[in-house]
Image (spheres, grey):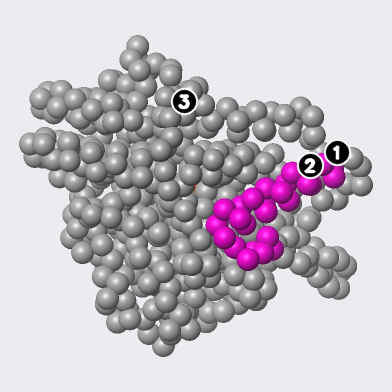
Amino acid sequence: MYNINKVREDFPILSRQVYGRPLVYLDNAATTQKQLAVLDAMRQEYLNVNANVHRGVHYLSQQATDLHEAARERVRAFIGARKSEEIVFTRGTTEAINLVAHSFCLSQMKAGDEVVVSDMEHHSNIVPWQLQAQQRGIVVRHLPISDDGRLDVDGLEQHLTERTRIVSVAHVSNVLGTINPVAYIVAKCHDHGIPVLVDAAQSAPHMAIDVQQLGCDFLCMSGHKMYGPTGIGVLYGREEWLEKLPPYQGGGEMIDHVSWDKTTFESLPFKFEAGTPDYVATHGLATAIDYMCQLGLDNIEAHERQLTAYCMEQLRSIDGLTVYGPAENHDAVVSFNVGTIHHLDLGTLLDRLGIAVRTGHHCAQPLMTRLGILGTVRASFALYNTKEEIDALVAGLRRVVQMF
Ligand SMILES: Cc1ncc(COP(=O)(O)O)c(C=O)c1O
């Protein structure tokens, strides 16, 4: 296990105060804080290296390109992909899913063909497919979940039809903390020749991921949820699939040759990276990944699982409090409501005590409908959170609840 006090020193924002109270930051599923090493790496790059990548013959451009491509290689190793050609940089999970939805539907689906998502998806894994449904007449189906927020994976095959072309599911729910058995889902779908996209926005920060072990065809993640900068994310795609898909956007960097008659495209992964990439952010992301790997993904997972279990146990001692999601196998996100008190009121009052949580539908309105609620309060943990912060949350909640 790592030294939590030392880790917290790496994130200066954690020692600030809000409303004259120590900040308790429990909104990590929305975005994580950034450690000094990431900020330093990006500052140093802007100060000493900055130049546009790939097309320059000069020294700085080559140095910036080396850093950018080294970051790609770092991401490849982090998720166990076979080749760095399988790593496409995007702005985040949302753009990565939009890329696949657009290019996959355009080239692999006809009107009436089906995509299967689940009832616990973030809007990022619903709306891109709905846009394709509007434009191309594909059909979006959704797998049901149990009352405690688990996918009925044994019944999965009932929802696959002759028209199912792709299945797209969250690895970890950003509301329920459910960890979906994606390796099992992939195996079942592959039995029917159906590829699977995994939305790893909420798993990549918390557990070791190996795309070859998962067997998935696509996997998406966001740098800013992994202690990296905003505006950078990753699409992993199995080479065979990426080769088959047409480009998502057009512009510089992604072409081989352009003429008025015919334009040909660059090889992978550049075919999917139109325009100047955020080459400083990729370096920042690689630095964040290094940091997580130095601490050890297994250590991070063990630390956060302990916090989550402790939080759920403590919260249940509050009268009228409902925790959503499974009791077991629950990742670093805890959503709850207390009686009929509005989640926004709870969140606002907790904020005045210095406790940052998220309230609302968490970009998962179909899930809220399934649960029969309008929203929840959500506390979500990161590698730097402590048991004392959970105590502060629980004590704060007790105080706030008494006001109603
Ligand atoms: C499960 C899940 N998928 C996708 C996203 C979208 O991520 P981003 O906004 O970084 O693209 C989020 C963000 O909260 C998420 O939790």
Numbered disc in front, either 3 or 2: 3
Q: Which mark is residue 60?
A: 1
Give the Cα distance between marks 1 and 2: 6 Å
Residue where numbered disc 3 is placed: 6
Give the Cα distance between marks 3 and 1: 35 Å
Residue where numbered disc 2 is placed: 64
Q: Earlier in the sequence, mark 3 or mark 2?
A: 3
Which x, y percent locates residue 219?
52, 61
For the view shown, which residue lies furthest in the top direction? 20
Q: What residue sits 32% from the left and 21% below the top? A: 354
Quadrant in the picture for residue 371: bottom left
Tell me the quarter of the image containing the N terminus. Answer: top left
Give the Cα distance between marks 3 and 2: 31 Å
Whether pointer 1 and pointer 2 mark residues with C-beta atoms closer than 8 Å, the reply is yes
Q: Is residue 187 above or below residue 266?
A: below
Q: Is residue 7 above or below residue 366?
A: above
Element under label 2?
helix
Which x, y percent locates residue 17?
39, 16
Residue 201 in sight from this viewpoint: no
Apparent side of residue 386 relative to residue 190 in the rendered image (left or right): left
